DNA sequence: TTGATATGCAAGCCGCCACTTGCCTATATT
DNA sequence: AATATAGGCAAGTGGCGGCTTGCATATCAA
């Protein structure tokens, strides 16, 4: 199980979430392509696969396998843990 | 300059934000004490100092020096960058 | 002024993380 | 059946981050 905070501590993983939030349900190869084409990131397929594994382990990405393809979906729910942890307060002047 | 995401990718730093959000304006020694007493974390003073440096560099903590003491204040503003980056969408069924 | 308090600076160690490489499995196509 | 496509597993490497240690600086108290 991977922490949501740790999952977000990587620009490549954040860009993957950007991509999925724009076009949901992409496969691993599609994500590799769009990352290279539109974001200038050129990593190996395995690198992206491992990133997707981290994101899925953190609950930020859900997957669905059909045939030999695996589709990835962005799930923003775990992000709530971040905003809920520190409720906005006024600064206490000393 | 440290990323907000990287600053949050550490349980000790997150606990420090918890502490400051409960009682704002603590000094380094106070934070060290409360971390040990109430959270079971026993790190050296320098470790906590470095954590505070990361948090300050990320804009999550602001400081104010008076005399030989330095007071630390939690600034939740940078957290907005997280929630604003991925606006909540409905999942697109294929 | 002398000593204690509160913090800063810098080097070094160690473990973890991102990335690659090579090989393997499963499904689809012809 | 044979080939291609989509993805998985595992070991190895390099670099960075967290922590410690030792020393230095600045402010307050006696």
Image (cartoon, coloured by chain):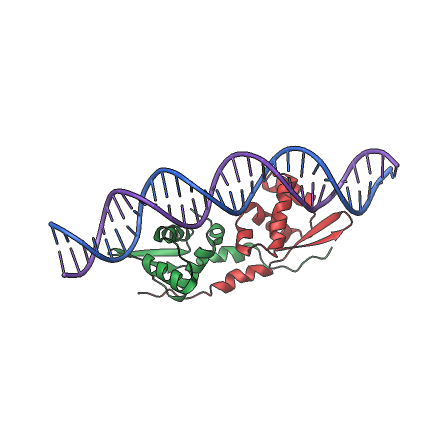
Chain colours: A red, B green, C blue, D purple
A74 left or right of A91?
right
Figure quadrant of residue C9: top left
Name the residue rendered at 74%, 48% in the picture.
A69
B1 or A44, nearer to the observer: A44
Q: How many marks?
A: 0
A48 left or right of B23?
right
Confirm whether residue A55 shows in the render: yes
Residue C3 location, x and y as percent? 18, 54
B58 left or right of A11?
left
Name the quadrant of the C terminus of chain A: bottom left
Residue A88 location, x and y as percent? 45, 65
Residue C8 location, x and y as percent? 31, 48
Residue B64 location, x and y as percent? 31, 56
Name the quadrant of the N terminus of chain A: bottom right
C1 or A51, nearer to the observer: C1
Name the residue rendered at 49%, 63% in the picture.
A85
Q: Is residue A17 above or below residue A46?
A: below
Confirm whether residue B27 shows in the render: no
């Amino acid at each position: 199980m991977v922490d949501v905070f740790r999952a977000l501590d990587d620009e490549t993983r954040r860009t993957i979430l950007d991509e999925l939030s724009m076009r949901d349900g992409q496969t691993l190869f599609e994500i590799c392509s769009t990352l290279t084409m539109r974001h200038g990131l050129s990593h190996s397929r395995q690198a992206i696969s491992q990133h997707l594994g981290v994101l899925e382990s953190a609950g930020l990405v859900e997957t669905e396998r059909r045939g030999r393809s695996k589709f990835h979906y962005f799930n923003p729910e775990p992000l709530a843990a971040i905003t809920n942890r520190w409720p906005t307060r006024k600064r206490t002047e000393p």
